[in-house]
Image (cartoon, rainbow, N blue to C red):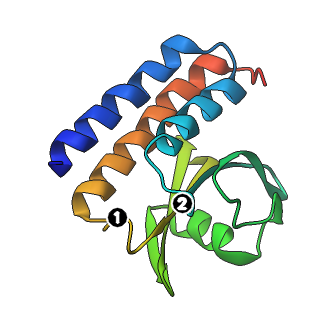
Amino acid sequence: MDKSYFLDELRLEIGLVREQVQTLSSFYSGITRKFANIMDNRSSVSIYEATDREFIMRVCAGPCYLDQLMSFGEGTLSEVAIKGDLFHQVEQDMQIIYLPFYKTHHLLGIMVLYVPLDYYVVSDDDFVFLKEVGRFIEVQHETFHPHTY
């Protein structure tokens, strides 16, 4: 399948999520489900909410490779929060992508994707797409304020 066509289809599916949900929790679940529909059984997507002191996993599809609760100031999520931009790393046979999302300059959360190298090769097109997803989450997040989990 052509990658640009694939990403356009996924973009459309994710864009429809907001019309199908009423709460922030269901919004997060809807987005992760769209990714889960295309993942293999080793892939994972999770969304962490940032609080004053910690990151809390709100939803996970696939194997949850990270802890459900992580203290702020420790680990890769904190590094991503400080850097403030999409971060990609490869560990052994797994590509890991961290996508922070914000309200102005306030960190709302981080989406984390684990993708096996032998399943899908992440490219610059994917990074552009994921940044669009992050921006979509940022914009739609406002429609759930105050948070309705």
Task: Name the residue rendered at 37%, 49% in the picture.
Answer: 131
Residue 35 placement (x, y as % from top left)? 48, 43
The residue under label 2 is which amino acid type? Ser
Q: Which of the pair 4/118 is nearer the observer?
A: 118
Marks counted in the figure total 2
Q: Residue furthest bottom?
A: 92
Q: Which residue is mark 2?
A: 43
Residue 144 in which image quadrant: top right
Instruction: Reply above or below: 61 against 116.
Output: above
Instruction: Reply above or below: 49 against 44.
Output: above
Residue 69 in which image quadrant: bottom right
The residue under label 1 is which amino acid type? Tyr
Q: Which residue is mark 1?
A: 120
Element at badge 1?
loop
Q: Which of the pair 65/87 is nearer the observer?
A: 65
Direction from residue 83 to residue 123 in the image, left or right:
left
Q: Residues within 10 Å of mark 2 (few under 14, many from 20)?
A: many
Instruction: Reply above or below: 82 against 131.
Output: below
Direction from residue 137 to residue 16 in the image, left or right:
left
Distance between the alpha carbons at the discs numbered 1 and 2: 10 Å
Pointers 1 and 2 in contact (CB under 8 A)? yes
Q: Which of the pair 30/63 is nearer the observer?
A: 63
Residue 67 placement (x, y as % from top left)? 80, 65
Q: Residues within 10 Å of mark 1 (few under 14, many from 20)?
A: few
Q: Which mark is residue 141?
A: none
Instruction: Reply above or below: 11 against 99.
Output: above
Image quadrant containing the C terminus = top right
Element at badge 2?
loop
Residue 58 placement (x, y as % from top left)? 75, 43
Residue 133 placement (x, y as % from top left)? 41, 40
Q: Reading the chain from its start, which is encountered first: label 1 or label 2? A: 2
Task: Name the residue rendered at 18%, 48% in the picture.
Answer: 1
